[in-house]
Amino acid sequence: MSRKIIGYILTIAAGVLLCGCANIGNPSGGPRDEDPPYLVAANPPDGSRNVERTSMTLTFNELVNVKDAFNKVVVSPAGRPPRVTSLGKRVTVRFDSLKPNTTYTVDFADAIEDNNEANKLRNFAYTFSTGETLDSLRISGMVLGARDLEPRPGILVGVIPDMPPEKMKEDSIFTRIPLLRVGKADDRGRFIIRGLAPGDYRVFALKDNDADFRYSADTEEIGFYQLPVTPATESVTAFDTTWNIKTASVDTVVERLRTRYLPNDLLIRSFVSLKRTQYISRYERNDSNRLFLKFNAPLQALPPMRILGDDMSGTVTETRADLDSLNIWLPERLAARDSLFMAVDYIRSERGKAPYMVTDTLKFIRKRLPVPKKKKKERKISAADSLARITTTFRLLGETPHEVWQPLEIESATPLARLDTTAIHLSVYKDSVWRRLDKGVRVYVPDTLSPRRLAIDYAWDYGGKYRLETDSLAGTDIYGRPTLPLEGEVTVRNADQYCSLTFNVTGLEPGMPAFVELLDTSDKVVRTSAVEQGRAFFPFLTAGKYYARIIEDYNGNGVYDSGDFETGRQPETAYYYPKAVNIKKNWDKEESWDVFAMAIDRQKPEAILKNKPEASKNRARKKQKEYDSEEEEEPFDPTANPFEERRNPTRRNY
């Protein structure tokens, strides 16, 4: 019996063993390929001279693709781009024609990537010359938005030869002469301009919307380096470190000489000019009572206007702070006319011309309501509808709880011709009773550009409850319609819900006017405070997360001023506080801010950075990276130096 049992056990064990051997698993495939492709051959070779052929072939170590070649690949000297194609391991560049005795540089940026994992080959360029001389100098740097310090990926950066000041000022030379040699900024805003001959150059950044390599439109984003730049080289000692695979320690350190190209730390701050060719871009009459005008650029003052065949008496003009659009309310005599002709006088400024006065005559036609095809059953007009046609209304603006530092605001539906401020009442709720306030209440128009708004100000109590009331007939609009009564209640925010923030600012030049802009998590301005004696104070804040930037206010006008290429004025300089500030309720917080403690390209917190570099976008993915087998450990990389600090050569404190 025991022999039979042993035989059964052996048979079962053999069967299990055979089944295990027959089980087919999925191969892991090895670690993910994270290395970009590299060039193994070029025809003609990189750096060749006396090149006559117009077709070049570049061969890489693996299958490659060229992504978005039209937008990413740029060629110096600037001109018509070549045709760039890829097939297998080869990339072909075909020119229509080549200039004699010229150094050509094909800058691929990060357009070349491998076929399988899309690993990008960054900062790759191919250079050759059609003459005996190969120009090899280069300059590099970074382009950031002047106010928001955002990297400007894809912006064109180029040079033109420096000229005497009188020639540079002749109609702004960059508007007539295209860029000579160019490069494009990468995802961090970094750029390299290659193939430069010895000499002095002017450096420009340009969002070249029309691909003419010139500053040809006011709407194009532009930046310029203030001083001429002279490219040069120097020899520096570099250290190559070899690592021991088994011990993970340094094996050997080899010194070698290499060439450094200077300058390599240019910072160009880009901006869009506020100077525009002025004209009326849109005008319309949406209803019988109002005319709307939209200008291409902000106005310096309200323009002279006149109605042909009549006058402007009784009209009310409403606009915004930047005076780029107008709403004109018409009195009854003008509103009743089917068509109106208006003459508008304004100053037009064009590039290269002195400002001059122009007059535009505009025709406004009252829109007629469409006639219904079928006669609908007449609806009985209610008393409320009848009352609405012969009256106008107020509405209470703002949200609750009300901020203790802000006035209440109300807005009339139409402009008022008469207002009795004594018919506006404010009451406070105390001891379970509403008590009318007779003293300390101020009623005024806060902004003459918005005449329909009224402000009611008072020394509000924290947590106080207030009621605003307007009597019937408190006002009459320009159409003779009286106002209906208004009643609204607001509660002021409690004191323990507020907090304050103080920045102690250091690093600015003595006497430099400056102001701090407090930002929300969307990089939008929440509040502004001037820097006085090194302090910027923000009271009455609500709890939350804030960011900040400081503006060097060169002209002391309290607002940010952009640059002007024609006059050579740079935009006002901005710096970011490099971290978020979290403020709690009923808490006063102080932060020390050394403006130049961190390099300018590192200052803006990544959380509010819109143009994030590719490395930042992939950081979360790298943290969660997995291989095909979850149990497989990450292989040791013998070429990695864990002690190496990778720094941006264009980084510099400004």
Image (cartoon, rainbow, N blue to C red):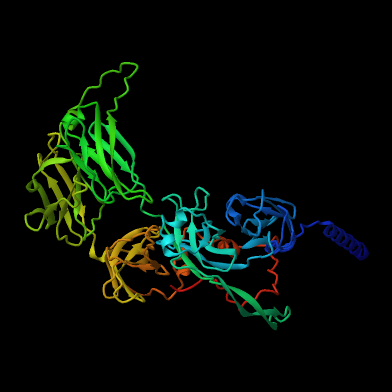
Q: Residue at x 29, y 40 (%)?
A: 293
Res. 514 image quadrant? bottom left
Q: Is residue 129 above or below residue 340?
A: below
Residue 384 visible in image: no
The image shows residue 467, relative to residue 188, as above or below, that is above
Image spot of residue 540 (x, y percent): 26, 64
Q: Position of residue 335 (x, y in %)?
A: 20, 30
Depth order, front residue of 211/621: 211
Q: Residue at x 57, y 76 (%)?
A: 645
Q: Is residue 381 left or right of residue 124?
A: left
Left or right: 245 in relation to 268: right
Vertical placement of 461 versus 261: above or below?
Answer: above
Residue 276 visible? The answer is yes
Looking at the figure, which quarter contains the N terminus?
bottom right
Q: Nearer the viewer, residue 182 or 25?
A: 182
Residue 104 image offset from top left, x and y in percent? 64, 59
Q: Is residue 40 left or right of residue 184?
A: right
The residue closer to the viewer here, 151 or 381, is 151
Whole-percent x, y for residue 329 in the image: 21, 37
> Disc count in the image?
0
- Identified at 81% across, 57% down, the residue is 23
Quadrant containing the C terminus in the rendered view = bottom left
